[in-house]
Image (cartoon, coloured by chain):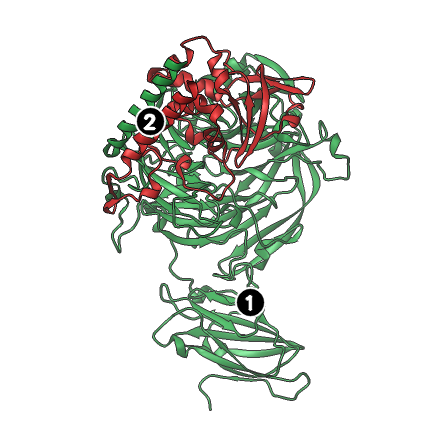
Chain colours: A red, B green
Amino acid sequence: MKTIIKSLFVLGVLLVFSACKNEPKNEATGTVLESTENSNAETAKQGQAFIENDESKPNVLQIAIGSSDHTTLVAAVKAAGLENSLVNAGPLMVFAPTNAAFDALPAGTVENLLKPENKDQLASILKNHVTPGNYSKEFLKKFKKLGQAGGESISVEVKGEDVYVGGAKILASIPAGNGIVHVVDKVILPVN
Amino acid sequence: MKKAINILVSLIMVAGLVSCNNDGNKRGNKGQGGLAGNAAEKVYVAPGEHDEFYAFVSGGFSGQLAVYGLPSGRLFKVIPVFSQDPEKAYGYNEESKPMLETSYGFVPWGDAHHPDISQTNGELDGRWVFINENNTPRIARIDLTTFETAEILEVPNSAGNHSSSFVTENTEYVVAGTRFSVPIPQRDMPIKDYKGNFKGALSFISVAPETGRMAIKFQLLMPGFDYDLSHPGRDKSHGWFFFTTYNTEEANSLLEVNASQNDKDFIAAVNWKKIEEYVNNGGGTKVPAKYAHNVYSDETHSATSTIMDEVLTVNPLDVPGAIFFLPTPKSPHGCDVDPTGEYIVGNGKLSADLTVHSFTKMLAAIENKKFDGEAYGIPILKFEDVLAGTVKQAGLGPLHTEFDDKGNAYTSFFISSEVVKWKLGSWEVEDRQPVFYSVGHVMIPGGNSRKPFGKYLLSMNKITKDRYLPTGPEVTQSAQLFDISGDKMELLLDFPTIGEPHYAAGIPADIVAKNSKQIFKLSENKHPYATITDGDAKVERKGNEVHIYMTMIRSHFNPDNIEGVKVGDKVFFHVTNHEQDYDVPHGISMIGANTSELLIMPGQTETFIWEPKLPGVWPFYCTDFCSALHQEMQGYVRVSPAGSGTELKWSLGED
């Protein structure tokens, strides 16, 4: 059922976006029709996140978008308006909680965070999952803590072969064009 | 969860729908070019009209300084500073080669960073621009009457000359701080012994009030941190200088991890007046140091390079009460002082917040001796005691702050790729605008002085990706101009830049334009090989050196026929432009010359060397389209075999 809802969700989003495709847009140079090739991004969105680029190695945002295990995270990133920060030259290390990790939060938490009035709170939670840097799981073992983009520090612990950041276990790691994505099994909530 | 997803779906759909109808409300949008209002009108400078401001924009790794007009973004000139420039023969012709001499020999390229304009009483006076070279530590002074590099001073004991080249209120000093600490004096030692043994030199370079001539007054040998950026106190804090530091951990490897361990690094506050007094009373220690001092003369149209052999150093502990550390979070980059001199902004590049210190509180804490320990004997003030305020969650990766004349500050954020306007005192964010993309420094004309001209802000961006027509993997870097005269910033213009637009200084055009020279007076030309009258045109042989004293005027060279040159000779073309008319330069180029072609301003003399390799008759010609008869401006040199008896002779207009 969940999968069906996901597909519905994706479909819904696509429909909404494609609805924008053929609308005439008033450009600076006069009225021109936007080419359909370039209009798959949400028209209100601008910035590096929306550059057409299929030659470069995928960036951390593109990796998250391409993962069916991270639809909640991607939705949250969009709701918080953080797309452009995630495609920056960085380098950026993103700890990406899975959908299951979000599901494990107390009931109602995600719904609440996605409300427009809670955008700042959502953004600060998401920024607690981003470190300026690019370190492999193995290399992370050198650290005791990491300074996160949101301003707080999170701990790094090694248990056997496993590495835990802010209490979340790294499940997998995917190198990106502008950093690295470590998939984690928990949402790392800021202390404040 | 199902419910959550449903909500998500609806939310995103709503967002999507809204976005379709949102076009009219957008600002700074790609495609619309930011033209929500009358942006085009605001940047349009009609043909023949002049721009309101000069912007001096560093070329970064190009080593040069570009001069643009604002608001048009038109490029007027690239001033060669630290790199050879074939356009003007800078660093190629014999006169300017000494400008690029260093203690390491001839270094014909450089990494230009932070231009700063000279000041009087804390206001821009438009006499000189200073700019630092990061790699081979040097400070240059550009003369704004000629828009040429007038002087370059190497900075010894420095490495990565980055917290430079900022001037005090009356241009008493231009300051150059080292980014990398090194052994002082340099010596062979294990790298792992860095901690406690390396030093960071902060150099205070005096500037002669009339001539601008630079000399190192003293070098303060600080603990071995990295000194990143700096700014002088203004007004009430005049007499102090502030330097951001990072790597207070004194790590010598993998700094991206090891230099981020301390939650706070320091801003070093240096009471330079106190140290100046100490030095004037005989304080400090002279130590051997080798560094070049290169000076260009507008009279001889030539540069000289002198190697200096000692420098005065000051141990901070010998001047108690002159240096303090202000704890500042997260590897601060920019160190900026507001026009009143009260606020010192530390832009913690790994922080989401901006930390602002109070000069008044700092003085009080010093007075009350409220210290929180010390570092290498230098007192550390308590963070809470000096903190004026924090701009909370202003953005990601703050780098640099400039100020307007209405009590607002503007900070660049690299990671979140935006410029954020905030209020001094309330620390509230007032506006934020995205930049395209990844801004480094920002510039408001006069924005680091007591008198900012808060009309425009220039954002200098490291990355452009899709903003311009593509030009292969290397695409232009870019500047973006914002109108900041209203409550909200408005994006007006994108324009491409030379090299990396690392940092800039801007000034109202009327302060500078009126002093701009139009010609060099021929009668004042003291070049040793100048040819002041046509009667003096000649060719002289000294062994295998042949010196041609040549003149040029529309539309011929004198002489234009030369014989008696032989294979194996070293031929010096000393060419004087006899024009005394504005904007009539001439060029000269010689087939087979391996040194340079020249571009010579009216009244000026320049020299290139030609070593002919084959017998024959070889042409030269004017390379600057000077006149209707430019194509006729040409001549020949006859080259005979080595040892031939061809007589040396020269002529113009003879059969």
Q: Tell me where residue A168 appears, x and y as whole percent.
A: 57, 16
Q: Tell me where residue B506 appears, x and y as whole percent.
A: 39, 42
- Residue hosting label 2: A12
Q: Residue furthest right?
A: B189
Residue B130 against residue B371 in the figure, above or below: below
Residue B459 against residue B66 in the figure, above or below: above
The kind of residue tagged 2 is Gly
Crowd rating for badge 1 (residues with CA inside 10 Å; few <14, some 14–19, many 20+): few
Q: Tell me where residue B378 appears, x and y as whole percent.
A: 63, 21
Crowd rating for badge 2 (residues with CA inside 10 Å; few <14, some 14–19, many 20+): some
Q: Quadrant of residue B327?
A: top right
Mark number for residue B598?
none
- Residues B80 and B419: in front is B419
- Residues B77 and B314: in front is B77
Answer yes or no: is residue B343 visible.
no
Mark number for residue B528?
1
Q: Are marks 1 and 2 on the same chain?
A: no
The quarter of the rendered structure image containing the N terminus of chain B is: top left
Output the chain of dot 2: A
The kind of residue tagged 1 is Pro
The residue mark sitting in front, 1 or 2, is 2
* Horizontal relation, residue B104 to residue B14: left or right: right
Residue B508 against residue B105 in the figure, above or below: above
- Residues B512 and A169: in front is A169
Q: Secondary structure at mark 1?
A: loop
Residue B100 against residue B620 in the figure, above or below: above
Answer yes or no: is residue A56 visible.
yes
